[in-house]
Amino acid sequence: MSQRFQDQNFRLTHFQEEVAVVCPKCNKKARATVDYEEKKAKLTCSYCGFHEIKDSLLTYLGYTAHYKAEAGAYFDAALWYYAPFKNDVFFAYNEAHLLYLEQYIGAKLREHKDRTHFTLLEKLPKFYHEAKNRAALLKLIQKLKKK
């Protein structure tokens, strides 16, 4: 792992248009994508061939609209990169998100620029930031990569 991490000021929304999910048919890794302009979401499994396209309408707090949610939400699909960690959960939307978290967690020096209080790293639960969890989180990430 690198000794230094430079925050790119990504927000969680940066990773939500293409999400690794559990296929509802075969339980293997599938891909959910969303096109907010077209208002369509698609779930595709390269293992079993499952394919579904949906309108991007979601109901939230009693209101139905075209919300900009993570791609798997339109299919109520479970995230692929999801695991319990102590009394919390660790998750990543896709491989790029997982790598970004791995680089951050593994770095001994974490540099932040132009903090906005809205970035992904600033909104992470405390356990992601704590040095005492570094080894266990990196081990968990390796396990998720091999899943």
Image (spheres, rainbow, N blue to C red):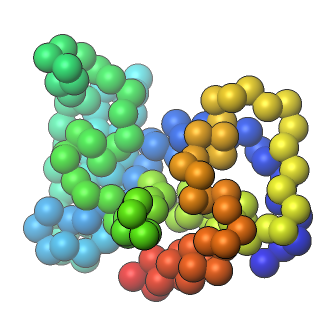
* Vertical relation: 64 (above or below) 16: above
Which quadrant of the figure has residue 113?
top right
Q: Total marks drawn? A: 0
Query: Closest to the observer: 37 or 3?
Result: 3
Residue displayed at 74% across by 26% down = 116
Which quadrant of the figure has residue 101?
bottom right
Residue displayed at 40% across by 53% down = 19
* Vertical relation: 9 (above or below) 91: above
Is 117 displayed left or right of 5 in the figure? left
Query: Closest to the observer: 87 or 33?
Result: 87
Can see residue 116?
Answer: yes
* Vertical relation: 3 (above or below) 123: below
Q: Quadrant of the N terminus?
A: bottom right
Residue displayed at 60% across by 59% down = 128
Can see residue 64?
Answer: no
Is 103 displayed left or right of 25 in the figure? right
Is 136 displayed left or right of 22 in the figure? right
Task: Estimate the x, y position of residue 39 in percent, counting from the top left.
Answer: 31, 26
Q: Quadrant of the C terminus?
A: bottom left
Query: Closest to the observer: 33 or 80?
Result: 80
Residue displayed at 18% across by 37% down = 54
* Vertical relation: 123 (above or below) 109: above
Task: Estimate the x, y position of residue 29 in percent, counting from the top left.
Answer: 31, 71
Task: Estimate the x, y position of residue 140 in percent, counting from the top left.
Answer: 50, 78
Is 51 displayed left or right of 97 in the figure? left
Task: Estimate the x, y position of residue 145 in percent, counting from the top left.
Answer: 50, 78
Query: Closest to the observer: 89 or 5?
Result: 89
